[in-house]
Image (spheres, rainbow, N blue to C red):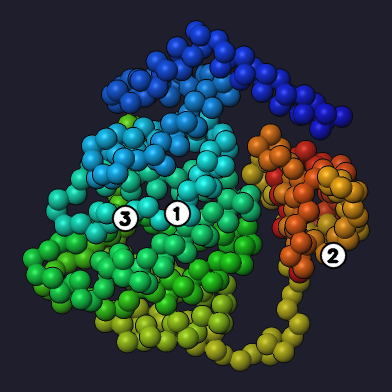
Amino acid sequence: MKSTLIWVSCLLIGIRVAAGQDDPASKYRIEKLLTDLNHSESSNKSAREGFIELGDEAVPRLLQEVAKHRQLPASVRSEEAARMLAESTRALRVLADMESPAAISVLSKTATAVYLTAGDLVSRQETNAERWKSAFRNEELDYLYGFFSQKRVRDIYVELATNVINRYKDGRYGVFRWRTCRLRYVDHVHIGVDILAGIPLMIRYDDRRVEDLLIQMLETMPYEICDGLGSTRGVASVLSPDGFNTARMDLSKSGVPFDYRIRMTCLQYVKQLGVKKAAPAIEPLLKSQFDDERRMALSVLLELTKETDDDTKKPEAKPDRVFLRDGKIVSGKIINRAFTIKTAYAQLPVNASDVSYMQIRHPVNEHDVIETRSGDRLTGELQDVEFVVQGADGAQVRVEKDEVESIAFGK
């Protein structure tokens, strides 16, 4: 009954949105709000409030604004490019304020594309367009972090993070390379993104791909430091809290080199997770010029390589984790023995022991999704209306399907 009501509610929203798009008065109001959004700091604030009041009716037009970052002119450092990126960034902030996941599909088409090209590495002559490129990318990440319970969002993050890491690896960022540091009298600025904020979220949602990301970062970030002929710092631009201007974010944190901060943070997470396969990537850090980094690397290596009686024991089983739409997490053992999903071609039973991940449909997702441990992906409509989770104390909790965002099945 509840799923039927949700379906009807979504249908009514769609009807209202379609009706609003054909209403000249509504169109005029939305365009007026967009003009105010990009006019000044004061008008931006009232425009954001107006968009929140309009709700779903304004979403299609806001998505068009966000998509402008894919239509930049040939001269990506021009003022026209800066204007388009600014408008995209501000519209994305509005969708974040509305807690609307509608932009995920727009961002997924471009988030993995590396378009921070000209101007990634600049000296003192940073352009307005370069500031807004960085601001859009960081706003994009902040927006995606709000929907990290969805595996498709984490997929976007993993590809984006991998692309950023690879750009360090092949020297296109260059700012952290020894040869670049030797350029005399140049204060290098890295205009980019800080991908570290996604690591604890990957851990929270038990996404094991975080281990490979940590290893890649440790392997890629060089441990040399500049020799005084130049200075290196990590700086990014972000959209400020006022939703209109850009602000500077020091990725280096209190003067500590950006790559050093990444390595130290990665070492802490590797130790926390016990990622033994990271040992080869840590060994070069024993030569670091930072005393505390050498000590930290040695400590983690000893922790990872020590043998204990626990190494011969069978690994402790991980619990199933049910992520609810209200942000809560229910952990335990799902005692449903099987699930049934109605696909486009058949109604299929799936043993619970074969399932690794499940995404429940809601207004943004067109289908329910079941991913199996063998790599199969089934899409359709899950026929089960509730999940029964047994906690460590033996108590059982019944969770209705409509309350669930996704489920990560343990081993």
| Residue 33 seen | yes
| Label 2: element kind | helix
Which residue is identified by label 1?
A: 113
| Label 3: element kind | loop
Q: Is residue 212 above or below residue 300?
A: above
Q: Residues within 10 Å of mark 1 (few under 14, many from 20)?
A: few
| Label 1: element kind | loop
Q: Is residue 239 above or below residue 271?
A: above
Closer-to-camera residue (31/294): 31
Q: Could you tell me which residue is drawn at 14 percent across and 53 percent down?
A: 124
Q: Of discs 2 and 1, which sits in the foreground? A: 1
Which residue is identified by label 2?
A: 353
Residue 54 coordinates in the image, percent (x, y): 53, 18
Q: Quadrant of residue 75?
A: top left
Quadrant including the N terminus: top right
Which residue is identified by label 3?
A: 117
Q: Quadrant of residue 122?
A: bottom left
Residue 60 coordinates in the image, percent (x, y): 54, 27
Q: Earlier in the sequence, mark 2 or mark 1?
A: 1
Q: Is residue 253 left or right of residue 347?
A: left
